[in-house]
Amino acid sequence: MSVPVPAPLSRSARGLVGLGVGLAAAGAAAAVGVAAGRATKDRHARLAVLAPAGSYAHTPDKEFAVIADDGVPLHVEADEPAADTASPDRPTVVFSHGYTLSLKSWVLQRKALVEAGYRVVLWDQRSHGQSERAPAESCTIDQLGADLHRVIEEAAPEGPLVLVGHSMGGMTMMSLAHQFPEVVRDRVVAAAFVATSAGGQNMMNLGFGQLVGRLLGRLGPRFLARLGSRQQLVNTARRLGRDVEDLIVEHYSFASAVSQQTVRYTGDMIMGTPLQVMADFLPSINLHDKRDALEKFHGVETLVVNGMQDLLTPPDHSDAIVRLVPGAEHLVVEDAGHIIMLEHPDVLNEQLLALVERGMRAAQEGVAVALKPRVRRTITDVAKRRRVAKARRGGRRG
């Protein structure tokens, strides 16, 4: 699959195959992007204000391993709020990251939630981040749901919970609800599905229809697995072609201006995931269908968030989730792509804090969440637009 200049794509799996396969081939296209890469660096230099030095640095309060039910060690981190903001009645917020990412993708959200007085738990899904490599046959959405259950058992065994999942992490939440409905029924006061899908369609169609989509669904894992057998060569090509890699990451991940630090931070997470792991998970993602599991979230304060320009899980995927969860709120963010938590962190942080508060109030007051009218809101990150405009004006004056 060649990757010159990425063409606009219209359906969810363009990202899952396009991002994974495209990034794998990025190094081979390095010469194509040299001039564009220099221009990109110049532009991003002016946008450093969007991610000042140290923005993504964080030292967790606790790091430990949770052993999955099949013996795979899962890396888990937890942060505790300051004593003057903590409350035993407040829920623990559990974050699940997306495909080819890691718990680092939530760095700005974990800081905001802890500062507001909430305990947070984050984990690297199997074969991602610092979790151990798992056998290919265990790299399924069903297994991820069981893994999340083990994380909750060990890291948050008591008290109310808020579940937050991005992309594959949202699918993991649905899998948890399908296998362990009592956890959602008895403990979850709020849930946020960020840039994800309940499935029920071929996730690999790339906008070409089901026939071609099925072919891509078969060939994508094989192609990645073949490249994965030469991971060292791919790593070398990647170092030589970082400019092209940055362009591809930016295209599939964001829909507005971001800093060079943000692009590299995201690219390092994605390409830190071995190509064989990408291949291992693609078949399960392609066949993902957890629409029935969303019934378990009835009565739970639910927020569904996505970017208007998300190329991986566009708004119609979120529409389907909202239809299946009565009372769910649907937030669509303008000028936002798939990695919305790094692109528009202030917006997402504000919405998550409001969600947690609604969930706590609903649980305490016995609010009939399922009877709430469905609400869809479109938000524009005006504050970010102003920062970008100011930075660009300053760059021109310089």
Image (cartoon, rainbow, N blue to C red):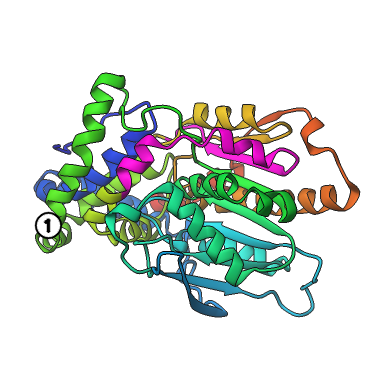
Residue at point 83%, 47% (across, down): 362
Compared to residue 201, the image places residue 78 above or below, namely below
Residue at point 83%, 51% (across, down): 363
Badge 1: residue crowd in 10 Å (few <14, some 14–19, many ≥20): few
User: Closest to the observer: 250 or 85?
Assistant: 85
Residue placed under numbered mark 1 in the picture: 229
Residue 257 in the figure: left or right of residue 349: left
In percent of width and height, residue 180 lies at: 60, 51
Residue 214 in the figure: left or right of residue 52: left
In percent of width and height, residue 5 lies at: 21, 35
| Secondary structure state at the residue bearing disc 1 | loop
Place residue 288 in its image quadrant: top left
In percent of width and height, residue 207 lies at: 32, 23
User: Closest to the observer: 182 or 101?
Assistant: 182
**What is the tally of numbered marks visible in this picture?**
1
Queried whether the magenta region covers residue 291, the answer comes back as yes
Residue 93 in the figure: left or right of residue 202: right
User: Closest to the observer: 336 or 371?
Assistant: 371
